[in-house]
Structures are given as structure tokens and as C-alpha cells.
Amino acid sequence: MNTLEFFGITTELATANEVVLTMPITDKTKQPYGMVHGGVNAMLAETAASIGGNTVLGDAHRAAVGVDLEIHHLNAVSTGNLKAVAQPIHIGHRLQTWQVNIYETTTETHVAVSIVTLTSRTI
């Protein structure tokens, strides 16, 4: 089972200009105090950016992988669904930088903002 399956992440849109992922908030995604774990926000942000990065690459022999992740947790949530929206800031020859905003969809609460830098490696 991979991360997408384990957390129930659904790809709503995946283009070179935008990636939208959704994920239900469940007990698997919460820390012991009942709020979404910050590491889950980070995983969702890097996943969204990596999907976009791989769309840009378009090469079955290369994969976009994270080399740097900066995330700011803005609001805690404990129910609903998360939506990650990733958009490229810079697409270079070796590095890509993506901004990812994460929202809770029912209340439209801005949960986190992240900057993810990717490189590509041969797979």
C-alpha cells in the first residue's frame, strides 16, 4: 500500500500549472490531541508538489523528488477534508519550486502554506 492509498488521497487535478489533492481527516491523520498532525500537512504538500513536478518532467525514466520543504501551520483542524492546491513558482532545468496551500474544505479554513523544492532523479 502506498501513501495515497493509506491516507485516502484523491487527485482531483494534475497539470503542469496546478495540482489539487483531497484527503479526508481521519484518526490516521491526527496527532494524540485530535488535530491533524503537522507531518500529515507536510506529506500532503510534498505529494502535491511532486505530482506536479512529475507532470512537468513527462519522462518515465525520471522522477521529481523533494529536496527542501518549508511549511507554516496556520490553523488546526480536526474534522472534514483537506484540499491541497499546488502551483509552480519556478520551473528550472534542474530544480522546481512549488507553493502549496492547504485548506479544510467545509469551513474553507487555511490550514497551512508550504514551499517545496524538487529535483529530478533517474529511476
Image: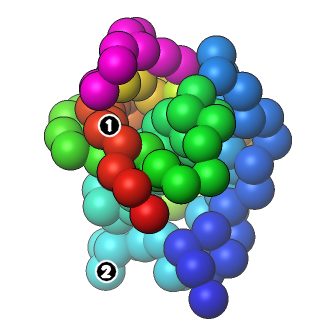
- The residue carrying pointer 1 sits among few (fewer than 14), some (14 to 19) or many (20 or more) residues within 10 Å by Cα, namely many
- The residue carrying pointer 2 sits among few (fewer than 14), some (14 to 19) or many (20 or more) residues within 10 Å by Cα, namely few
Kind of residue at disc 1: Leu
Q: Is residue 54 left or right of residue 20?
A: left
Residue at (67, 76) in percent of width and height: 5
Kind of residue at disc 2: Pro
- Residue pointed to by mark 2: 32
Where on the picture, by quarter, is residue 118?
A: top left
* 114 within the magenta span: no
From the top left corner, tell me how far across and down residue 16 is, in percent.
64, 22
- Residue pointed to by mark 1: 118
Q: Is residue 35 left or right of residue 7?
A: left
Query: Against 1, is 41 above or below?
Result: above
Query: Against 14, is 27 above or below?
Result: below
Report the front residue among 91 and 98.
91
Report the front residue among 43 and 72.
43
* Number of the label disc, if any, that sits on residue 3: none
Mark toward the viewer: 1 or 2: 1
Distance between the alpha carbons at the discs numbered 1 and 2: 31 Å
Report the front residue among 20 and 39.
20
From the top left corner, tell me how far across and down residue 28 is, in percent.
51, 80
From the top left corner, tell me how far across and down residue 30 is, in percent.
43, 72
Query: Against 93, is 85 above or below?
Result: below
Q: Quadrant of the C terminus?
A: bottom left
What SS does tag 1 mark? strand
Magenta residues span 87-95
Where on the picture, by quarter, is residue 1?
A: bottom right
Report the front residue among 41 and 95.
95
